[in-house]
Structure formats: structure tokens, C-alpha cells
Amino acid sequence: MDHFTLSLCVGAAAGALDVIPMIAQRLAFRSCLSAFCTYLFAAVIVFHGRLPYLPWWAEGMAVALMMALPVVLTFTGKERKAVPMILLNALLLGFLISVAERYLTA
């Protein structure tokens, strides 16, 4: 499997991990699609980019947090209870993307 396809597969898996609880809560399709695309694109960025001065395990967390920040800013007024969960998911899934990039690539 080439590098780009692997990054898409890892991103799809991370996106699915984030979206499954959202579907169980019967959230809007747009919200689920947004979350899925966030982690799909985060994986591609982590697999194909390098952030200076960060260890390998922190790159995914940094990229996922940066991509989740606009979502967090939209929720600060309406649903403040969702903000910690979004940030925690970004850290956890970003870390898992970094681990996958580190150990699945040759």
C-alpha cells in the first residue's frame, strides 16, 4: 500500500472512531461528516508533513488540535459541555494517527 493510501485509511479509521458515538447520539449528518473529514485530512497532513521542534508522537496531536479549534470556537457559546470532549478526542485520535504513521510506514 502506498503512503497516500495508508494515510487515507488511517484517517478514515480515526474519523470512524470519532463519528460512531456521534451517530449513536443521533447528531446531525453535517456534524458527523465534518468530524469525519477533520480526522481524514489530519491524517493526510500528519503523514505528509513535519512540524519542527515536535517529537513524532506530538505531531498528530498538534495537527488534530489545530483542525479542531474552529469547531471548538463555534461551540463556546452554545454547547459548552461538548468542548472538553472535542479537545480530548483531538488529543487521543491525533496521538493514534502519529503512532500509526510511526509504525505503519517503512
Image (cartoon, helix red, strand yellow):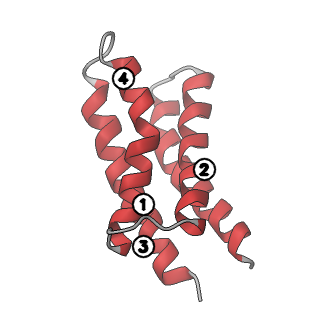
Label 3 to label 1: alpha-carbon separation: 8 Å
Q: Earlier in the sequence, mark 4 or mark 2?
A: 2
Residue drawn where x is 55% and y is 65% of the image: 49
SS at circle 2: helix
Instruction: Using the image, determine if residue 53 lies above or below residue 81.
Output: below
| Marked residue nearer the N-terminal end (2 or 3) | 2
Q: Amino acid at mark 3?
A: Val
Q: Amino acid at mark 1?
A: Gly
Crowd rating for badge 3 (residues with CA inside 10 Å; few <14, some 14–19, many 20+)? some
> Alpha carbon of mark 1 to alpha carbon of mark 2: how far?
11 Å
Of residues 87 and 24, the one nearer the viewer is 87
The CA span between labels 1 and 4 is: 20 Å
Please tell me whether mark 3 or mark 1 is closer to you in this view.
1
**Mark number, residue 41:** 2
Direction from residue 75 to residue 97 in the image, left or right: right
Looking at this view, name the residue that lies furthest to the bottom: 106
Between 68 and 33, the residue placed more toward the observer is: 68
| Amino acid tagged 2 | Phe
User: Could you tell which of marks 1 and 2 lies nearer the N-terminus?
Assistant: 2
* Residue 99, disc: 3
Q: Residue 69 is drawn in which quadrant?
A: top left
102, above or below 72, in the image: below
Q: Mark 1 highlights which residue?
A: 60
Q: Residue at x 43, y 64 (%)?
A: 51
- Residue 102 x/y as whole percent: 47, 79
Farthest top residue in view: 78
